[in-house]
Image: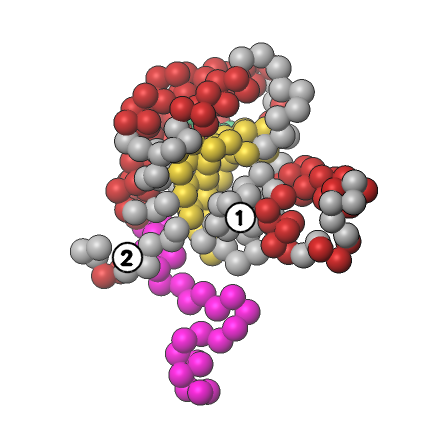
Amino acid sequence: MANPELAIIPQHVAIIMDGNGRWANKRGLPRTVGHSKGVEAVRETVRAAGEAGVKYLTLFAFSSENWSRPESEVNDLLGLLRRFIRRDLAELHRENVRIRVIGERDELQGDILPLLVEAEETTRFNTALTLVIAFNYGARNEIARAVAKLARDVEAGLLTAADIDADRISESLDTAGIPDPDLIIRTSGEERLSNFLLWQAAYSELVFLPEYWPDFDRKLFYDALRIFASRDRRFGGLSNQTAAVVG
Ligand code: FPP
């Protein structure tokens, strides 16, 4: 990588795309325009992540709590996701992007689940960037489903309680096989995780940006990568510098 500040590229970047509504509000536009502009920011971010050498990009597209929004807005968000898959799948496939979907699948109605599954199936052997779409996703729900699955395995005699450790829990989550996010970005100035990847975020670096999601672009993505590269990740141990002094 030509830029020395970007010597450390996170393997997995996860993004809470926040602020579509406020972006629109500020301009006197309907919220739906903010969401549409948000999809353009998604496209640019996927390209930037692939180009930077990021291997996994997780986007919080629709939370399990988003169903409580007015029906018209829910339909709007579902429509945008639908159109994104329909219009962009061929190009993503050409670019060797693999799509994975995390979130609760039971009881999803209509064509959205078949579309997401088709995107996963079509791209399953792709090896460049993995784009993880969090849809109908809530971390507590994901953890509860994993725990219930492990309890069923114990009941069935496939496991004992003593077999359940952190690795086994990780492998029972929707993100099984995906490394934990190194970097989580949230836009719009809010500084919380809002039920996003709670288990997986144990050692993630958090970067909060003031810009609203529709304004997010390649430059802001690289800004976040630079902030990440400047952080000293210790995972509960000592920093390299301190370790050198102590050792
Ligand atoms: C937050 O803005 C954003 C969302 C709830 C959804 C994000 C969805 C998209 C960008 C479009 C579909 C996604 C893909 C992957 C194609 P907000 O409405 O909560 O903003 P506010 O907090 O300013 O009201």
Can residue 31 be seen in the rendering of this structure? no
- Stretch in magenta: 223-247
Disc 2 element = helix
Distance from label 2 to label 1 (Cα)? 24 Å
Point out residue 43 in the picture as x, y percentages from the top left corner.
33, 30
Q: Which residue is mark 1?
A: 191
Q: Which residue is mark 2?
A: 6
Outermost residue to the front: 157
Point out residue 187 in the picture as x, y percentages from the top left corner.
44, 41
> Quarter-wise, where is residue 156 in the image?
top right
In primary-sequence order, the first of circles 2 and 1 is: 2
| Label 1 Cα crowd, 10 Å radius (few <14 / some 14-19 / many 20+) | some
Point out residue 107 in the picture as x, y percentages from the top left corner.
67, 20
Q: Residue at (26%, 42%) from the top-left corner?
A: 51
Question: What colouring style does the render use?
Answer: secondary structure
Disc 1 element = loop
Report if the beta carbon of the residue with label 2 is closer than 8 angstroms to ligand 1.
no
Mark closer to the observer (2, 1): 2
83 sits left or right of 192 in the view: left
Q: Amino acid at mark 2?
A: Leu
Q: Residue at (32%, 59%) from the top-left corner?
A: 8
Residue 117 numbered mark, or none: none
Point out residue 56 in the picture as x, y percentages from the top left corner.
41, 43
